Amino acid sequence: MEYFTISLFNGVVYGLLLFMVSAGLTLIFGMMGVLNFAHASFYMVGAYLAYSLQKIFGFWPAIVLAALLVGILGMVVEAFFLRRVHRYGHAHELLLTFGLAFIIAELVKLFYGNYPLNYRVPDALNFAAFQVFGTDYPVYRLLMGGISIGMFILIYLLLTRTRVGIVVRSAIYRPRMAEALGHNVPLVFMGVFGVGAALAGLAGAVAGAFYTTNPNMALELGVIVFVVVVVGGLGSLEGAMLASLLIGLISSFAVGIDLSLIDFFGLFGAREWAESVGGVLALKISSLSATIPFALMLLILLVRPSGLMGEKS
Amino acid sequence: MKVSRLVLYVAVAVAILVVLPAFLSHSLVNAVNQMLIAALFACAFNILCGQGGMLSFGHSAYFAIGSFATLHAMGVMSSESLLPTPLLPLAGALVGLMVGLVAGWFSTQRTGVYFSMITLALAELLHTIAPHLRGLFGGEAGISSMRMPALGITFGSDIHVYYLTLAWVVAAVGAMYFLTFTPLGRLIFALRENTHRLRFLGYNVHNLGTITFALSAMFSGIAGGLQAITIETSNYSAFEMHLSAEVLLNAYIGGVQVFFGPLIGAGVMTFFGNAVSDMTRNWLLYKGIIFVLVMMFMPTGIAGLLKLLGESFRKYSLPLLVPALLLSVVSTILLTMGTVFTVEMMQRGLSQDYQMLARAAGSAGPPPILLFGREWFPGSLITWLLSLGLLVGGGFFVWFSRSRWKMLKETDEDESVLLPKLGDGSGKAGLNKRENV
């Protein structure tokens, strides 16, 4: 029970963090058809900027500033890079963001060195929220989850209840028609790109203090975020939320399960045979926790390519 | 005329590569060896990406699998070698082909961005699972083996390995070039250009995609096998994403729309990587910048640039062309100098060692940085004015040379289709989301 509760909490919080990063990615994809490889780099830049800024401005202002700066960076990327290569097609845009992700990672190494940063949760926030089965549960985790949920509600309301949201949704659904009706679609694109980047930057600034901040964090998270977006359905915000929670829970539960296929065969009395085969059968689920999301993604892509909540295939 | 000229070029290139070891030191022979392997890998990648129009983000997996298969065939832990050393890459080819068939069957179920995502997922799947499969991939330490003497050759020296690699690379690239003229090769092009029409003509598009994928994986496996023979070891880090990124960058910098483009790209980039990596830690940054510049301003890559040059020489008279060319060269040199100087200064100034020195110096001001045989003071204005000046000057020359090129083009407006149609290949590469709806 203890394992279950703690894994549940950790999984949900991790899932909510994944959602913060993947929300922007999925919106950008739904709108522009660009799968932005540099999106996780925005997450990383957010963490690094927040680290530098908090020395000057303190923790909370640094987080807000970092998110804003990353948002501006996102707009610059859209306006000066992506828009230029738009006419060459989506493959080209994908490759360009891939190159940008590469450059951002190298620049981060150039400025901050190729090692983890000492970016920590401030002492004022470093206390236990409550006790679960005798262990302290850090309040910062709850805070991360809270920020993510707040963001989800905010975006959801913005998209469904405001005039701006209507324009954005119409630009996502039928960009040409929206343009023909007199809306400035390139501006909307740039805005959504900037907001998406800012969200990723915010996630990085918040999560960087809790998890490690190092030059590989973009790559590590980036691949998982792709999984989330594909599983949830490219372009679907609700799908991204669902898939984030799913992946978060799977990763957090799998780490503690010490079973393998041998145990499965043991149920049918074939334990000796399975042990003699070894190899894949002897792999414990705990050691596969990093593999399962990819297997899930393959399964989804083959069975239901539009994702759990996606509409377009 | 055109074919005979190509044969001539290729013969000259191969002849140079054959006599090269006589003039080079051992470490340089090794570097050329690496260039050849990278070139073969990029070319194999291009079957899928440039010719088939399917963008793979996980191609290092098939390279790595070829490596591991070859190592197993070489004999791990004192077991006998299965094949004589010169034939070992066959193991990589065979296993690459088989894995490619399976992976290709899965990934070509979908097109466009979904295809790319599946290749990425497959590669990451292997990357995360490989360290746990000790028998196959040797855990975190990896597996290693030894080249055995065969056919009266010891394969002990780098020169022997070099000639083995050269022979395999020439044979494999020749086979891939030949493939483009076969009916299958033509169908692969058709796969990139118009899948719908291909389907209407009665071809099984999925099978065709699978075969393309498998062939690409097979040649990647050969490249991996050659790598295994050269370094005699491998571990699970061979599955890492950055190797997939490298081959992609190489291929695109070279130019994916021309058969020999990726060869050129991989050769040039690996050569520079080897030459520069001793001098700077920022090679990857430069490579990324080159890639983004190519993507933004020169989507046909080095091959496209060479073609453009060739055409310009034929079309314009020299007195008109030379100033424009010179301006372009000057602007490139200035911008390169500016970028390199700025990046290197920053890297040295921001490094931990230097920061410590600077702090120790205290009020005496930060100590000078040794760069390009001179001492620069990071505190002085001149240092940064120089880097700014180089960049601004380069930018000015870019503007100047562009106006020159524009003038050139206006001189014969009727032949204005000088630039190859840039967007064509990539636009039809199938990643167009709305096209697939």
Image: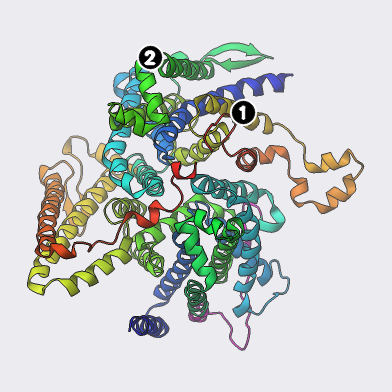
Q: Position of residue A199 (x, y in %)?
A: 40, 26
Real-space CA distance between mark 2 and mark 1, rounded to the nearest whole angstrom: 30 Å
Amino acid at dot 1? Leu
What residue is at 28 percent from the left and 69 percent from the top? B307
Taking depth in this image into account, of A282 and B425 the one nearest to the observer is B425
Extreme residue toward the top, this view: A130
Q: Earlier along the polypeptide chain: callout 2 or callout 1?
A: 2
Q: In the drawing, does residue B300 fall left or right of residue A29?
A: left
Mark 2 vs mark 1: in front: 2
Q: Residue at x 44, y 17 (%)?
A: A160
Is residue B45 at least partly visible in the picture?
no
Asked if the magenta segment contains residue B158, the reply would be: yes
Circle on res. A162: 2
What residue would you read off at disc 1?
A246
**Neighbour tally class for label 1: few under 14, some 14-19, many 20 plus, Cα within 10 Å:** some
Q: Which residues are magenta?
A: B139-164
A149 relative to B273, above or below: above
Q: Are marks 2 and 1 on the same chain?
A: yes
B355 or A118, nearer to the observer: A118
User: Helix or strand or loop: what does disc 2 sit on?
Assistant: loop
Name the residue at the right extreme: A269
**Which x, y percent locates residue B308?**
24, 66
Q: Secondary structure at mark 1?
A: helix
Q: In this figure, which colouring scheme has been used for the structure? A: rainbow
| Chain label for disc 1 | A
In the picture, the quarter occupied by the N terminus of chain B is bottom left
Tag 2: residue type?
A: Thr
Q: Is residue B354 left or right of residue B180?
A: left
